[in-house]
Image: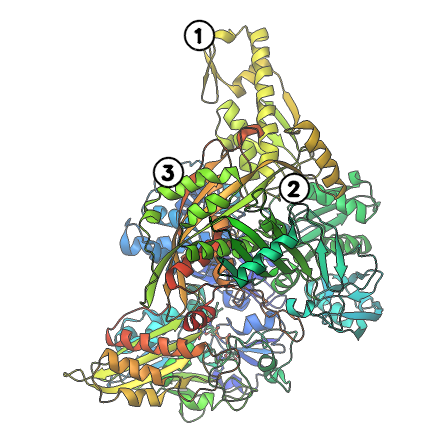
């Protein structure tokens, strides 16, 4: 059963999994791992706008598409890390359909989860078959029973932007709060069914900040990242780093901010040496699985590459 | 009800029948030009325009079509043909055509946007790759696609009225009019579905189909198990149902009751080599049901539990001596080498899945089957045999086939199920594998482990060769890896110890994949040769030339030596993060043909029609036939009407073993010549044309007074002509004997004289930090004799190259190690190359290779893919100093390898 709601008031009565653009949920329904009723929210009004306040901070409606974020001139100017990531993920066709809400709240891409032939924590099971089985594309920081990396590129990016989100009828939450600490293997985010994410709020960018996003992949394009990173830097006129935000994806079952890397950058000169030293810290504290040791170098390399790109303001994303 | 507009026409549909737009568009609106492949948004085959914006309709909720303006490929037909479509036709941006509608609608949207922003400026390849990043083409038509999109955007087709397509069926493919088996919708057609084993190995103690039969809307339920009542792999077919719709069929599958006794299972090559493993895949004494993973040739062998050792005709020579020599070399300072190399399994993943639609006549004594097959004639015979029917009572249609690559050569379960279900249903039934099923049982190139040892004499000769190849084709046998290695560098007198072991596992059967065994054989041996050249500090070409016994390789060595890029190559790997390398590998392939292939050509004032019961899966059969006739009559190939994909026609070759062209060109040409001679005779007789004064002009003749097209001439003569020809043998006696043998094995194939040869020089760029490899360019040389249709030969080569790149760098069929269940169930996890992976490709053909073959040319579809992966591995070694022993060389392998090197 598919209920299309046209007003947020209808949310209370409607029962079922929320559907926005459909690009994730329909793929899961096709293979039978998402069943039961659906509440289609794509016709809720007023959620497809990017609004700016007088501080130059953006509020992004949940229906704004990934493609729109990647092309919006103001977004590119103010939040280049986010716009770049939006332009680098998935495929052009997916980006025009996928909503920001869905991008943040999509379910994991683990091959065991997306396969009706296996049971796992996220499907009501009591174990993680990837941990015992093939976890080559698994986590590098083992934060909880589920060992597949969190899928959300933009969730990761928004960690570096210290964004907050609005859930219909509730107080704003920090973006970290919707992902938790990775200890609960049964979910990909902390929202309850029928809780509607309505807006994403981005703090105003720092003056003169520069940013970049980069992912490490095997093919040239359109591949889920092995490791991905976003970096924001603010330098003073002596090229000393005054602010640094670094987040990474593909390495943990939640998007990760790397405070120890940020610390290694703060108040240092923006030089290759500083970037290398900071990037070398990225894998610190990791707990690799038997098959994911290779992510040590990829994490170092991806963070280093992203730092250099941010410094040089390189537009790009895939590599 | 949802209201929408598609291609300017208003549609109203019940949105509850299906959830996503692709089913609504294809099934409810009947617009089958749009294809569904992956179902998850990864391949772009289902792309349609919604208010002008390309979207993948397989994940687009159908309710999102409400009040939208939808455009599908059907919009661009007749006088609405778009310049982009013309560009695809001319630049051959397609092979099987299954991905084509998706590419076209996306490219048209790109075109519109591009023109708005850039006018008729030519977009760069980068820009095209970015726009088409959401599309995959398994045939590898990417170079043609680049060229098509660039030239159409640049305005090259703006004013063009009519174009000459590179292949004769291009128009049907760029308009979505080509009807593939998945598009067949017969009246009253039921949906068939297969129940598969959840276990890798089990005994089915009890199977109760009654609960499924009891469900309303279910029209047939059948048992698919054989007498052993065993399932030997995860996905093994147990039963099948047919019902009025998909949902009811699913419900019926779930209702079937099965009781299993789960047996120990082997799920890896390593486990199969363990003599103490409790499982046995084929415990039966007689092993008749064991499937063959090779493309026809079958070598009987001896079994040792889960290992099988086939008796190869040309493999080992003085094996004891070979063993002794490599051992001696290992214990002395003799130049020698020992390496263990591996290849992951590679799935065919044709974009059109395995599928069949069957319909019986009223009396239930004649069945018509629409099938996605590479062998419509052979399949008709197999169906007849399986269902105990006279072969005249079976008709197979395969007008368009969305890729095969070797996986669609034989009668498989989807066809058996469709035929049986249709009989019981008393209605047509379709069985179409979904992508997960296709990835599970649609076939793959086996995973291989090769233990290689070589020693050289002080003079630099190959002294001894030892290869123990283990291949995991699941429950099937015959990888051909060892056989092909045994047939390489085989100079008289070299002792060699070759084992070609099948390691049986409880996993789905492998099937022949383009050049079966070839890429693995080259991966093992060509890396060995490359390493020895490096160790001995000799030129890799010189070393190969010394060892190679295939005379057809020689012109290729000459060509390679003449390449400036080879002459200028550096010798040392660089220490930098980004490095470049060049790698060389050789390949060879047998010359095969079907001596019984027949052609029927008809000609009259209405035109030329040529027929045979063969098929075109993108390999270009239609075009080759048309070209043969066109050449004789000086016509354009698309003026010749070709009828294929119908088993009722005269016997046509199976499209496998690179035999199609070598089997049909000569008889087609001969038929055309016969008819031409007759026309001229008649003309002389009836119209008093002076034969001596005749000159040929394009599409006709002229004498002193007049010129006539052939059609006019036939019209005036008021005659119809028909010629019926047969391929025949090159050399009567020996090949005839060989044919009797192969035919006993169910094959219409003869091995002709001489081997086709190929050389591949690959250039790589490696990012050692992030483990990434890019291939900017490859140079491919061939010695295959005459090239009949150069544009299509190039397309075949491009496909072979890109599939080889996939094999080397990206593709890996992965199973869960504990259960043997498939993990790479779709095109997101199973990564085939995209357009940005496509390198520049330079092609060289050596002249004069096959003077003894009728038409002077042989096939190339397989030889072109054999050396690719090995040349890439050698290039990576050249670039980094690290030898990639295991494929695919994904980033995780490269960073680990280079770190440890
Ligand atoms: C080939 C391919 C490659 C991809 N690569 C990447 C990648 O590299 N990085 C990446 O991040 N993503 C990637 N994606 C995933 C893509 O970003 C998501 O599918 C998309 O963002 C989901 O958005 P949607 O609007 O379609 O969500 P839907 O499919 O409609 O919903 C997704 C989930 O979010 C929930 N949801 C959606 N909106 C709301 C809301 N407002 N409030 C509460 N719950 C909500 C739904 O209940 C559902 O569970 C890829 C997808 C494909 C097909
Ligand atoms: S079928 Fe829709 S993207 Fe592959
Ligand atoms: S032509 Fe693209 S898949 Fe065959």
Q: Observer-nearest residue: B200 or B900?
A: B900
Is tag 3's residue or tag 2's residue first in the polypeptide sequence?
3
Vertical placement of B6 versus B659: above or below?
Answer: below
- On whether disc 3 and disc 2 are found on a single subunit, the reply is yes
Q: Horizontal placement of B316 versus B173: left or right?
A: right
Mark 3 Cβ and ligand 3 under 8 Å apart: no
Is tag 2's residue or tag 1's residue first in the polypeptide sequence?
2
Is tag 3's residue or tag 1's residue first in the polypeptide sequence?
3
Residue B740 in the image, given as x and y percentages of width and height: 75, 36
- Circles 3, 2 touching at the beta carbon (< 8 Å): no
Vertical placement of B459 versus A251: above or below?
Answer: above
Label for residue B704? 1
Going by the picture, which residue comes out furthest to the left?
A237
Residue B21 in the image, given as x and y percentages of width and height: 55, 63
Distance in Å between CA atoms under marks 3 and 2: 38 Å
Residue A204 in the image, given as x and y percentages of width and height: 27, 85
* Callout 3 secondary element: loop
Q: Mark 2 belongs to which subunit?
A: B
**Which quarter of the rendering shows the C terminus of chain B?**
bottom left
Residue with the mark numbered 2: B654
Q: Residue at x 32, y 54 (%)?
A: B124
Residue count near mark 2 (Cα–Cα under 10 Å), binned few <14, some 14–19, many ≥20: many
Residue with the mark numbered 3: B160
Distance in Å between CA atoms under marks 2 and 1: 46 Å
Residue B877 in the image, given as x and y percentages of width and height: 42, 61
Q: Observer-nearest residue: B106 or B74?
A: B106
Distance in Å between CA atoms under marks 3 and 1: 35 Å
Q: Which of the two discs, 3 and 1, sits closer to the camera?
A: 1
Q: Observer-nearest residue: B562 or A203?
A: B562
Vertical placement of B686 versus B564: above or below?
Answer: above
């Amino acid at each position: 059963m598919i209920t299309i709601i046209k007003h947020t008031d209808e949310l209370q009565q409607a029962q079922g999994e929320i559907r926005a653009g459909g690009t994730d949920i329909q793929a899961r329904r096709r293979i039978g791992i998402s069943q039961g009723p659906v509440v289609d929210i794509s016709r809720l009004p007023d959620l497809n706008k990017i609004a700016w306040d007088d501080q130059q901070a953006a509020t992004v409606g949940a229906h704004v598409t990934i493609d729109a974020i990647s092309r919006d001139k103001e977004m590119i100017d103010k939040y280049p890390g986010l716009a770049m990531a939006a332009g680098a993920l998935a495929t052009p066709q997916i980006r025009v359909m996928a909503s920001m809400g869905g991008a943040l709240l999509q379910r994991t891409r683990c091959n065991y989860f997306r396969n009706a032939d296996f049971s796992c924590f996220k499907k009501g099971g009591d174990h993680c078959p990837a941990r015992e089985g093939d976890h080559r594309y698994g986590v590098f920081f083992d934060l909880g029973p589920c060992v597949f990396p969190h899928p959300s590129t933009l969730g990761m990016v928004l960690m570096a932007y210290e964004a907050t989100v609005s859930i219909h009828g509730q107080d704003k939450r920090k973006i970290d709060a919707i992902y938790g600490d990775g200890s609960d293997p049964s979910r990909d985010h902390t929202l309850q069914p029928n809780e509607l994410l309505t807006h994403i709020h981005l703090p105003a960018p720092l003056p003169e900040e520069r940013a970049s996003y980069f992912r490490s992949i095997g093919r040239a394009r359109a591949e889920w990242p092995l490791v991905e990173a976003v970096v924001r830097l603010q330098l003073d006129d002596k090229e000393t780093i005054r602010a640094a935000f670094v987040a990474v994806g593909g390495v943990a079952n939640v998007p990760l901010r790397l405070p120890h890397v940020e610390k290694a950058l703060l108040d240092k000169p923006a030089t290759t040496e500083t970037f290398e030293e900071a990037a070398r810290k990225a894998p610190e504290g990791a707990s690799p699985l038997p098959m994911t040791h290779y992510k040590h170098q990829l994490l170092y390399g991806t963070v280093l590459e992203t730092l250099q790109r941010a410094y040089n303001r390189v537009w790009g994303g895939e590599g | 009800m949802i209201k929408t507009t598609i291609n300017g026409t208003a549609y109203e549909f019940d949105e509850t029948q299906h959830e996503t737009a692709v089913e609504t568009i294809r099934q409810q609106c009947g617009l089958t030009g749009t294809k569904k492949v992956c179902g998850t948004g990864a391949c772009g085959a289902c792309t349609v325009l919604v208010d002008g914006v390309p979207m993948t309709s397989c994940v687009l909720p159908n309710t999102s079509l409400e009040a939208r303006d939808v455009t599908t490929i059907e919009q661009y037909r007749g006088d609405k043909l778009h310049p982009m479509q013309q560009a695809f036709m001319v630049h051959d941006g397609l092979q099987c055509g299954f991905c084509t509608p998706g590419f076209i609608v996306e490219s048209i949207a790109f075109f519109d946007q591009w023109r708005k922003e850039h006018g008729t400026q030519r977009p760069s390849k980068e820009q095209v790759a970015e726009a088409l990043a959401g599309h995959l083409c398994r045939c590898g038509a990417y170079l043609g696609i680049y060229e098509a999109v660039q030239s159409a955007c640049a305005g090259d087709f703006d004013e063009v009225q009519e174009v000459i397509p590179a292949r004769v069926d291009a128009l049907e493919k760029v308009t979505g009019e080509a009807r593939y088996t998945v598009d067949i919708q017969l009246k009253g057609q039921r949906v068939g579905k297969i129940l598969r084993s959840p276990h890798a190995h089990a005994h089915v103690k009890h199977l109760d189909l009654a609960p499924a039969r009891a469900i309303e809307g279910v029209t047939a339920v059948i048992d698919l198990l054989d007498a052993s009542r065993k399932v030997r792999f995860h996905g093994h077919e147990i039963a099948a149902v047919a019902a009025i719709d998909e949902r009811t069929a699913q419900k019926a599958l779930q209702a079937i009751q099965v009781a299993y006794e789960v047996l120990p299972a082997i799920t890896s090559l390593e486990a199969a080599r363990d003599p103490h493993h409790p499982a046995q895949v084929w415990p039966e004494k007689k092993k008749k049901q064991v499937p063959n993973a090779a493309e026809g040739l079958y070598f009987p062998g001896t079994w040792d539990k889960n290992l099988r050792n086939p008796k190869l005709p040309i493999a080992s020579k003085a094996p004891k001596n070979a063993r002794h020599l490599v051992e001696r070399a290992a214990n002395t300072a003799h130049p020698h080498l020992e390496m263990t190399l591996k290849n992951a399994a590679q799935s065919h993943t044709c974009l059109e899945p395995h599928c069949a639609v069957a319909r019986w006549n009223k009396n239930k004594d004649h069945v018509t089957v629409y099938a996605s097959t590479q062998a419509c004639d052979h399949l008709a015979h197999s169906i007849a045999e399986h269902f105990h029917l006279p072969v005249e009572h079976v008709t197979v249609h395969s007008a368009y086939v969305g890729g095969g690559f070797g996986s669609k050569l034989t009668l498989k379960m989807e066809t058996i199920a469709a035929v049986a279900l249709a009989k019981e249903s008393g209605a047509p039934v379709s069985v179409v594998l979904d992508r997960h099923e296709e990835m599970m049982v649609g076939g793959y190139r086996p995973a291989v482990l090769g233990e290689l040892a070589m020693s050289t004499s002080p003079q630099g000769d190959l002294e001894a060769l030892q290869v123990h190849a283990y291949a995991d084709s699941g429950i099937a046998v015959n990888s051909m890896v060892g056989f092909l290695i045994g047939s390489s560098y085989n100079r008289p007198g070299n002792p060699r110890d070759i084992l070609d072991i099948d390691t049986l596992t409880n996993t789905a059967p492998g099937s022949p994949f383009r050049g079966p065994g070839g890429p693995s054989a080259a991966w093992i041996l060509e890396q060995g040769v490359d390493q020895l050249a490096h160790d001995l500090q000799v030129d890799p070409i010189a070393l190969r030339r010394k060892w190679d016994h295939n005379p057809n390789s020689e012109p290729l060595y000459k060509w390679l030596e003449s390449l400036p890029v080879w002459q200028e190559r550096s010798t040392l790997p660089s220490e930098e993060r980004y490095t470049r390398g060049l790698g060389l590998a050789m390949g060879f392939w047998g010359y095969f043909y079907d001596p019984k292939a027949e052609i029927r050509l008809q000609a009259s004032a209405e035109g030329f029609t040529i027929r045979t019961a063969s098929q075109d899966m993108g390999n270009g059969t239609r075009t080759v036939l048309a070209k043969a006739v066109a050449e004789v009559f000086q016509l354009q190939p698309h003026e010749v009407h070709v009828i294929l994909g119908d088993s009722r026609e005269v016997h046509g070759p199976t499209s496998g073993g690179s035999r199609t062209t070598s089997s049909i060109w000569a008889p087609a040409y001969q038929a055309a010549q016969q008819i031409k001679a007759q026309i001229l005779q008649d003309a002389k007789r009836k119209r008093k044309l002076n034969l001596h004064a005749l000159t040929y002009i394009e599409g006709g003749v002229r004498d002193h007074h007049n010129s006539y097209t052939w059609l006019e001439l036939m019209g005036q003569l008021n005659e119809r002509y028909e010629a019926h020809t047969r391929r025949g043998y090159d050399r009567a006696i020996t090949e005839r004997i060989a044919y009797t043998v192969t035919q006993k094995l169910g094959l219409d194939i003869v091995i002709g004289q001489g081997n086709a040869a190929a050389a591949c020089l690959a250039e790589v760029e490696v990012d050692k930090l992030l483990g990434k490899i890019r291939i900017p360019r490859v140079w491919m040389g061939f010695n295959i004799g005459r090239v009949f249709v150069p544009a299509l030969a190039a397309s075949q080569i491009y496909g072979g190259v890109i599939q080889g790149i996939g094999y080397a760098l990206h593709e890996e069929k992965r199973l869960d190690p504990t259960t043997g269940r498939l993990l790479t169930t779709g095109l997101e996890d199973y990564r085939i190359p995209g357009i940005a992976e496509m390198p520049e490709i330079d092609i060289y053909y050596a002249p004069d290779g096959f003077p003894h073959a009728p038409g002077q040319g042989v096939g190339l579809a397989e030889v072109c893919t054999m050396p690719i992966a090995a040349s890439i591995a050698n290039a990576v070694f050249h670039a980094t100093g690290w030898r990639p022993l295991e494929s695919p060389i994904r980033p995780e392998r490269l960073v680990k390898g280079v770190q440890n090197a």
